[in-house]
Amino acid sequence: MQASLGWFKYLSLQKQYEIADKYIALLNISTPSADQLVKNLSGGNQQKVILARWLATNPRLLILDEPTRGIDVGAKAEIQKLVLSLADEGKSCVFIHPSWRKYYVRAIALLYYGIRRRSPNLTVM
């Protein structure tokens, strides 16, 4: 977020805490306070913090390369639900995962040797 404001327009400390508290609540990040160092959080909560940092920039396109790798099942489900809710809001999300067939896919676009194919309302189990 600071990069979008420029070098000389700083976010106030109050605004920083407002943003942190918003995403701590939205992503259900388990932390004693917003001042907690990320390295002291669990792996799943660390992943959520990284995701929150990108979401705070209000991106139109979000590319997630294995965002659920190496985290517990509960955190994995929360991140997957969040990605689906972002897609429902009209955000473009690219969810890269080696076992994508496990997930419910509403629409899929496959790129294979430069050929683009779109299949609407596809359910993959």
Image: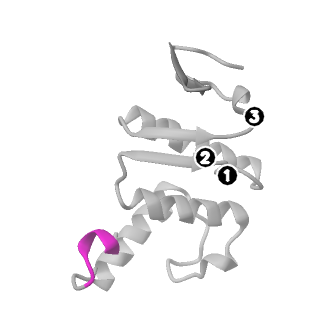
Kindly state the secondary structure of the residue where label 3 is placed.
loop
Q: Position of residue 78 (x, y in %)?
A: 61, 46
| Quadrant of the drawing holding the C terminus | top right
Q: Residues within 10 Å of mark 2 (few under 14, many from 20)?
A: some
Q: Which residue is mark 1?
A: 75
Q: Which tag, 3 or 2, sits closer to the chain's start? A: 2
Residue at 73 percent across and 28 percent down: it is 102
Left or right for 83, reference 77: left
Tell me if label 3 and label 2 are in contact, CB under 8 Å: no
Q: Is residue 37 above or below residue 101?
A: below
Type of the residue with mark 1: Ala
Tell me if label 1 and label 2 are in contact, CB under 8 Å: yes
Type of the residue with mark 3: Ser
- Magenta range: 2-7
Kindly state the secondary structure of the residue where label 1 is placed.
helix
In the rendering, which numbered label is found on residue 99? Answer: 3
Residue 32 vs residue 98, the one in the foreground: 98
Q: Is residue 6 magenta?
A: yes
| Quadrant of the drawing holding the N terminus | bottom left
Helix, strand or loop: magenta stretch: helix
Q: Image quarter for residue 91?
A: top left
Residue at 41 percent across and 32 percent down: it is 88
Q: Which residue is mark 2?
A: 78
Q: Which tag, 3 or 1, sits closer to the chain's start? A: 1
